[in-house]
Image (cartoon, coloured by chain):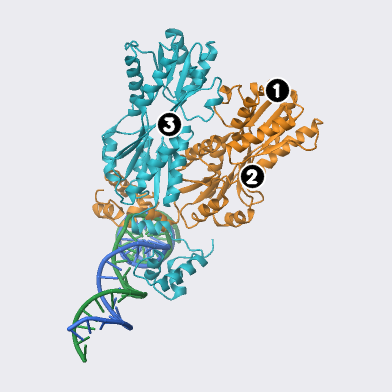
Chain colours: A orange, B cyan, C blue, D green
Amino acid sequence: MAEAVNIKRLAQELNISIATVSKALNDSYEISLKTKNRVWTLAKELNYTPNPAASNLRSHKTKTVAVIIPCVANNFFSLSIKGIEEIARQYGYHVLIYQTHENIEAEVAFTNSLLNGRVDGILTSVSSSEYNSEYYTNLVKKIPLVFFDRVYENLDAVKVTTDDYEIAFQATEHLIECGCTKIAYLYGLENLPAGKARFAGYLDALKTHGIAAGEQPVVKYQDDEELNLQHIKELLKKYKPDGLFSSIEEFIIPAYCACREMDLKIPSDVKILSFSNLSTAKLLNPSLTTITQPAFEIGREAAKCLFKILNNKQLDDEQNIILKSMLIKRESTGC
Amino acid sequence: MAEAVNIKRLAQELNISIATVSKALNDSYEISLKTKNRVWTLAKELNYTPNPAASNLRSHKTKTVAVIIPCVANNFFSLSIKGIEEIARQYGYHVLIYQTHENIEAEVAFTNSLLNGRVDGILTSVSSSEYNSEYYTNLVKKIPLVFFDRVYENLDAVKVTTDDYEIAFQATEHLIECGCTKIAYLYGLENLPAGKARFAGYLDALKTHGIAAGEQPVVKYQDDEELNLQHIKELLKKYKPDGLFSSIEEFIIPAYCACREMDLKIPSDVKILSFSNLSTAKLLNPSLTTITQPAFEIGREAAKCLFKILNNKQLDDEQNIILKSMLIKRESTGC
DNA sequence: TTTAATTACGTAAACGTTTTCGCCTAGCTT
DNA sequence: AAGCTAGGCGAAAACGTTTACGTAATTAAA
């Protein structure tokens, strides 16, 4: 590393004070255009960039936000991050990434480690393992926070979500219209509002169409591919459903495999649809009907909200932004 | 935010100097165990965490690394990040993410913005748009840098890559063994060593098996789905290949669509294989033979290397770590 | 002409750590 | 008894900024 080029060095070479340099660099009204230009050109010439640590320390701004999510290697979240990062670039912010792996203790630990001024704000999609709103009730008082997709409700924080209930209702109706009378539910995110809303939409659609509101065949998600496969196979054997509503992408592979292993044809024997951001849904065998959330847009919206808050701009109106998902009909529901 | 709890506050409450507190917190040998314990318990009690900006400013260490990649929303890169983040957690490092979108100017801009002490080191998989090694030749002198997958060669930096040549050779042989005699190549990453190695492995396999070393039918990747589809269709029409070797995942969808639109059956009319980290490869119609890179492991290895460097540990031996990819044979190559 | 306001810049403190150096005390060694 | 050593701690400088405040020169208002 060459000898450090800092504000002091610029000041010396230009024979002005470091205060003037600092103000010039920040385009302060106190400084004449002439001086600013001298500073700017020398700064460019020497390749000066301000030391972020010093700047943060003094100004209490970091131009950095954290994204806390369950896992990066997931179509929904990687698209969300893409959106977040894109907006962050526009606003000149840096983006830190933390994965909780659905572990609430990790989630809390990460979050706490950010409260000492490491970041200006947090974007989070919370872990599904537990719903402990006490922690977040306190947290939102300490740091600007925006929830996306997986949210805590009744908090003084911005939330960006999708129309889970409505789209699940609509998707269930689609299955019914395609002739399903016994639709099993593959249940994910059961502790979270999103998961509950999806399930509620499914149940209400059944009820609306006069389908047994009694015991619904349900498989709850486990963090174990093999186990999910087993459970789906058991469900198929026991209840012989003619439709599968998968509420999370993680059920797709075990569901398809289960049907294949049990020699059930999709869609003639069983129709399937799933929440999913899989880009290859249309290439699956058979192509998969999906409920596709606007993951990229969710990331963008959440980031925009956070940056508005950080720049003290009034949020237009709502604390809750609800984006629309799309039901994309393909062969797996066969109509 | 409650009144700040900092080192000064701890010092006051314990009636000792801030120097002692700082040393105690850092477990310095200068401080007696008794004092350390007093400091530690109070720190825990008051929920003290050191201010990172102050610490960075003084110590010139940030416990932060940057990951610079083309795009997060890609199976390979999101898995890599997952691996990086996991190792970072173990070492107590924070992870910043930057997307270049294959734009070399953005890549340079991001990288330059990190040289002022924002991070301790960089992990990067470079843009494919250009191969300008001058910049990186200088860069590696300025900051600890580890390349993964998409690397610049002949630099004094650690590189984590895969056996692109060998696996491409092997995959091409597989196509030949399955009966292909005219194998077209869908060419990605042509400016990078990885892309060239894959192509070379393909060519050499053809040569080894006595297949025309002349003009090979090739489609070069464009950042435009529609265009790639067009080009593949033209290629299929013009050259009537019986095999497609796709060197990057991005060609899968257009390749499958092209065959479908032209009524070519996979694998009877055309056999296909592709480099890919797609988890649903086995569910495609037909299931796709893939060359799967150990993306997660690559991320882990790259991160481990960087942290070893940052902790001044001698790297075991090699500057080049080469991991093995897997050829996973499925229906799309039909044998 | 005097006073007030404005413009343009400088001084110095502050942000919260880490780290060098030096001091003091106890316990040893001669 | 004098001199050493080592252990335990504190004073103060430093890291590179930002910013409150002060000041001098110029301009506008009275």
Tag in front: 2 or 1: 1
Quarter of the image that includes the N terminus of chain B: bottom right
Q: Secondary structure at mark 2?
A: loop
- For the residue pair A29 and A216, the one nearer the viewer reads as A216
Q: Position of residue B7 (x, y in %)?
A: 43, 67
Q: Position of residue D7 (x, y in %)?
A: 33, 74
Specify the label residue B293 is tagged with: 3
Q: Secondary structure at mark 1?
A: loop
> Is residue B161 visible in the rendered structure shown here?
yes
Q: Which residue is mark 1?
A: A269
Q: Is residue A245 above or below residue A106?
A: above
Give amino acid for label 3.
Answer: Gln
Mark 2: few, some, or many residues within 10 Å (few <14, many ≥20)?
few
Check the residue under mark 2 and report the chain it is in: A
Specify whether disc 2 shares its chain with disc 1.
yes
Mark 3: few, some, or many residues within 10 Å (few <14, many ≥20)?
many
Q: Position of residue B157 (x, y in %)?
A: 29, 40
Identify the residue at horizontal 38%, vertical 54% (top origin): A53
Q: Is residue A304 above or below residue B8?
A: above
Is residue B158 shown left or right of residue A130? left
Q: Which residue is mark 2?
A: A318
Specify the label residue B306 is tagged with: none
Mark 1: few, some, or many residues within 10 Å (few <14, many ≥20)?
some
